[in-house]
Image: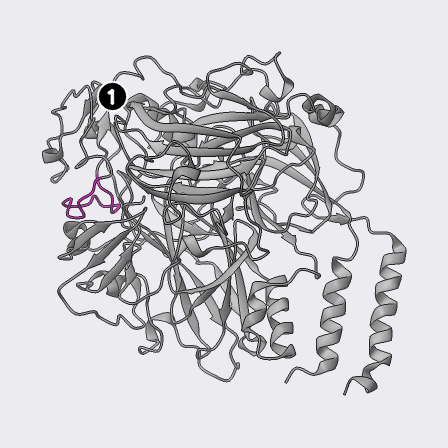
Amino acid sequence: MITPLFTVITSVLLTSRVSEAALRKYNFTLHSGTRSPDGVQREVYLINDQQPGPLIDVNEGDDLEVFVKNDLPVENTIHWHGLLQRGTPGMDGVPGVTQNPIPAGGNFTYKFSVGDEYGFYWYHTHFRAYYDDAIRGPLMIHPSPSRTRPFEKLAQNDGDKAMLLQAERDAVPVMLNDWTHDLSDVVYERYFRTGAFPHCVDSLLANGAGRMECLPESILQAGVGLGLDSTASMGSGSMKMSTETSSMSMMGMSMRKRQAMTMDGMSNMPGMQMTSTAPMASMTPKSNMAPMSGMDTMTSMAPMSSMAPMSGMDSMSGMSSMSGMDSMSGMGSMGMGPLNPKGCTPPMMFRPGFNISSLPPPTCANTSSSLLTIPANNTQGWLALNLVNSGAVTQLGVSLDGHSMYIYAADGLYVALQEVKVLYLSVGQRYSVMIKLNQSPMDYYLRFASYPWGDMQQVLEGQAIVSYKMNTTMPKRTIEARDGSASVYMLTNGSAAMDASTLNNDNLHPFDGNSPPSKAADITKVFNVSQTGIVTWVINRDPYIEPSMPIVYGNASDGWNANTTYHFPANSTVDIIMAVAEDSMDKMAHPIHLHGHKFWYLGSGKGQFPYASVTDAPSSMINLHDPPYRDTENLPMSGWLAIRYVTDNPGAWLLHCHVQWHVLSGMAVVLVEGEKEIPSLLGSESTSKAPPPSGAKTGAASTHTPKYVFLRNFLMCIGTLMAAPFLF
């Protein structure tokens, strides 16, 4: 039983840790290493010899200083995904937009305040595709104790509340990502040379740990739909699947056992939402190769009839347009034929002269490498996880066997509480979840699986382990020996099992009641998203090309007046309506991320947006009352997305698709606001080359809180103990 004394002391200690703003310093060294995260050895790019990089752990109101030394042979930057950089537009970490890249052997110091921001974020390189090589890590801003938490409604008493608050404080960051066995520069070169989109990954990792587990032949032959007799109904970025057969419970089975079964009962799938080649020295030093020679000409596509057997794909269609080819764009049918050994459908498009035989043959070999194990003490009642999809191309479904997840934050900010069994994360999105530890003490799988979307279809599941604390005298039961004690809520292809609840994205209302300006927008901008060439993806017809001088430096930049740079007046309400162009060669979904801002997600749907502005649309289509407030949201397949934000943060901010290979092939624009104020905000810090702080420990946080704060906190605890007799 939690005593009132314990509750008060816990509250005091939590308060004392975040009572004063501090300067937190970290030193990062980017360097090369060799790792076998899924049991297969390859070269990786590391931060302080870690994969993922070190956790940055700060409090609301803190200042942050990160010194980055680049010991890699390639240029780099660090972007702080989701952080606004209010007042520090030169610290956003985007080459050609907010800074020059950090050269090989060089360094850069990022300095900014987190201000009143709080919650779970992540950082990653924004240069080339190097975050695929492990240059990424978690960032946590602990919220002020004065903030009310959504999960407090789960508490039955003060003791429960204290345990929930402690669980949030101890929340485990879980970085989920797809993984390839080739260095990203190899994948990059192969994509732009052959035109084959690199959607087929080798494994899925959690905090840099995972393994390869090959699918049985029965699943490979069944295809992405697992052989289900299903009917699909297209909704706003999701697909519901139903079968005529009865649902199976699938209690407590290993992945291999579940894969070998006929998996009836699929009810929720958001699927329709949507060896080395050239040496590194041959690569162009800039992060954007688009446009390449011939890139804007539609050259060749493997015909649908050739996709089933994987062989004999030498004949190319040479099509000049895919307009109206809905059966191909988005790959709407779930019965697409056999999968390759990695569980993938074959690529659809190639440059002239290339075909499936131009790619390394797909292979799979089982490994037994260690999985991430997350300790959970059931005597503490709750476990909190901070989840992020930090991958390159793979949309993920996540579930924990036998447990519900209570979502209390999205993209860092508190939201109206939702209970789900399966949670879907687009690339770049984050969710914080609270889990009630109310099952028998043993190991449980935290499952994360790819789900089909667009032409990137792969059946692949990864796992981590949530391990309850157990009495040492009790024999430890393995996951495979749970004897039906835990439900498996997610199928191998990422779809939710029958009756397993999933997230209602439209109900992620801001917990603090934050609503958009109610008046009509000052500016409405329509952006058409399109694939215009084999390796060209654009917003409004023009591929984004990285400027040689950062746009934030003004009209001296070669990108200041580019067709992909848009200038908006300060303190204006801007509505952006994004739509997949009707003449796009591919009409797949896209996770859209805006730098420098959170935005209100007003709505999304199928087809083209049929109104001139959001104020003309009915309330059933557009939510101006309590819409979600995010920094990453999905543009549905063959559909539209409407967002609203206020230009109250002077700077140059990138808006882009977070699928790695889309942004690198041109799917981005830059939004400039408050341009007259930008020069005064840059200062000398934007070109800082300062050495690391004297005596600072690499990768560790240095807290410069005044000594009197520690004394005050100590006296507060003593005072609490002296008052203990009066608390009962």
What amino acid does circle 1 point to? Answer: Arg
Q: How is the image coloured?
A: one colour
Residue 712 located left or right of residue 666: right
Classify mark 1: helix, strand or loop. loop
Q: Is residue 493 magenta?
A: no
Q: Which residues are magenta?
A: 331-345
Badge 1 is on which residue? Answer: 351
Q: Position of residue 373 (x, y in %)?
A: 48, 62
Residue sitting at x 44%, y 46%: 36
Quadrant of the drawing holding the N terminus:
bottom right
Q: Position of residue 332 (x, y in %)?
A: 20, 43
Does 592 appear above or below 395? above
Does 444 appear above or below 32? below
Does 636 appear above or below 490? above
Majority SS type along the magenta span:
loop
Quarter where residue 12 is shown: bottom right
Quadrant of the drawing holding the C terminus:
bottom right
* Viewer-nearest residue: 492 or 405: 405
Quarter where residue 260 is shown: bottom left
Q: Position of residue 625 (x, y in %)?
A: 49, 50
